Amino acid sequence: MNAVAARSKERLKGLKGTLEARKRKELEEMTQLLDDLAKNLEAELSKEEPKQLSLFSEEERTQIRRDRLALEARLRRIPEERERERLAIEERYAGLVDHTFPVAVVLIVPASFAKGVSER
């Protein structure tokens, strides 16, 4: 049984390293994605409003204002979303429990079959 425990510990060490690398990758990808989103929103918000806004209908001007407010609101939510996603990823990889199941295979072969194979 000591051999099973030793092999189990060795395998678990490798798996923990793999899971830690996967967690770091997920965190990096999530951070990069939200950083890119923030940059795109900031770029869109830094654009000037159309110079001849008065040529637009009232409905179009209202829609432009709503769009801008929606972009600003989304940009404000990014830090909170970044923290929420970080915590979700941390939680997903926390509290992992290992289970070791020793396995053995026993073959039962009739004596007559074993003799016939060895004589051939």
Image: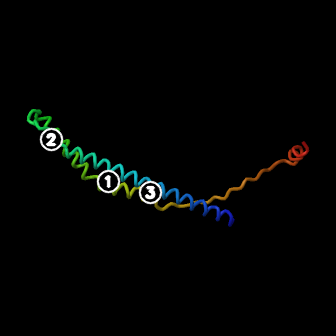
Q: Residue placed farthest to the bottom in the image?
A: 2
Residue type highlighted by circle 2: Glu
Quadrant, the C terminus:
top right
User: Do residues under tags 2 and 1 come within 8 Å of each other at their CB atoms?
Assistant: no
Residue 81 image label: 1
Residue type highlighted by circle 3: Arg
Which label's residue is closer to the chain start, 2 or 1?
2
Q: Please, what secondary structure does the residue beneath circle 1 have?
A: helix
In the picture provided, is 14 more to the left or to the right than 74? Answer: right
Which label's residue is closer to the chain start, 3 or 1?
3
Image coordinates for residue 56, horizontal then vertical, percent: 11, 33
The image quadrant of residue 11 is bottom right
Residue type highlighted by circle 1: Glu
Give neighbour class at mark 2: few <14, some 14-19, many 20+ (Cα, 10 Å): few
Closer to the camera in the image, 56 or 66: 56
Residue 24 image label: 3
Image coordinates for residue 96, horizontal then vertical, percent: 50, 60
Identify the residue at horizontal 42%, vertical 59% (top origin).
90
Q: Please, what secondary structure does the residue beneath circle 2 have?
A: loop
In the picture provided, is 41 more to the left or to the right than 94? Answer: left
Question: CA–CA distance between discs 3 and 1?
Answer: 18 Å
Identify the residue at horizontal 11%, vertical 38% (top origin).
51
Question: CA–CA distance between discs 3 and 2?
Answer: 40 Å
Q: Please, what secondary structure does the residue beneath circle 3 have?
A: helix
Residue 49 image label: 2
Identify the residue at horizontal 20%, vertical 41% (top origin).
67
